Image (cartoon, helix red, strand yellow):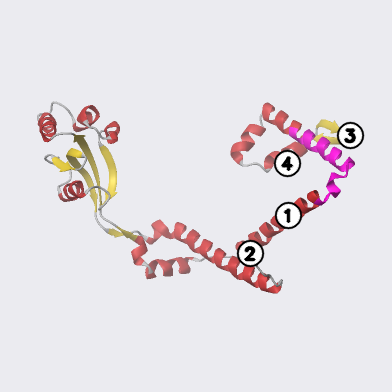
Amino acid sequence: MDSKVLAVVDGAEITERALERIIEKYPVEKRIYFETDQGKKQLLEQKVAFSVFGKYARENKLDKTEQFVNRLNDIVDQMLTQTVISDLFEKVKVDENETRKFYDENPDKFALEETVSARHILVDSEEKAKEIRKMIDAGEISFEDAAKKYSECPSKEKGGSLGYFKHGMMVKEFDEVAFSQPEGQMSRPVKTQFGWHLIITDDKTAPGTMKFEEVSEKLESQLREKKQQEVYEEMYNSLKEKYNVNIY
């Protein structure tokens, strides 16, 4: 089927199909733009520019200069290297038995530490913390609203929520209260180097181990990358020896 001619440069046609082939090489997010009228116009201008500048360069024998030939050889070497490595990596496979074996032999890598999810209100004095706690207990204001109104921590924008954290991620005094108190309970004022806190522990997760099904896909990818690096280094070293490489 004939393709619509969009431009002619010195007798050579640039067709709609030629433009479509260029667009197909772009990532999807860029392809969307180049499929618009404005994008196609921009791409066509670019294609025309490549053609006229290319013709000018050949007419003036710029493609015969040492600088051009060296740059071209570098580009060819890069493309050939990418092709060889791509073919090499394509042959690297990791099956479920390998991932399962690694999982079973390295339980420490898949251990889950105890975590808690907590909210807090930070103020500069014990008296203020006690006053806020009293208002919350009396139902005059919710913890979230009190955090937004009184807390000096950036977490106030989220009602005081700090999300989940592990042991040691918070200062010692805060850590001890958040992990030791029952879920849903609001602490009495707790002093740290940052000020005075009211803390609610919302949830606790016990220590455990990630299930194989949860990590198998990521683990397979990691083991494949490791194998690919190994086969790359093996081939690279053998080629250096084959071609008598000396690095000074």
> Badge 1 is on which residue?
74
> Badge 3 is on which residue?
10
| Earlier-in-chain disc, 1 versus 3 | 3
- Residue 43 visible (yes or no): yes
Spatial CA span between label 4 and label 2:
27 Å
- The percent position of residue 157, horizontal first and vertical second, equals 29, 31
Say which residue appears at 84% left-offset and 49% top-offset: 65
Spatial CA span between label 4 and label 1:
25 Å
Query: Which residues are drawn in magenta?
Result: 46-66
Q: Is residue 134 above or below residue 246?
A: above
67 lies left or right of 60 = left
Q: Residues within 10 Å of mark 2 (few under 14, many from 20)?
A: some
- The percent position of residue 59, horizontal first and vertical second, equals 89, 41
248 or 73, nearer to the observer = 248
- The percent position of residue 180, horizontal first and vertical second, equals 16, 50
> Do the CB atoms of the residues marked 2 and 3 lie less than 8 Å apart?
no
Tell me which amino acid carries mark 4: Arg
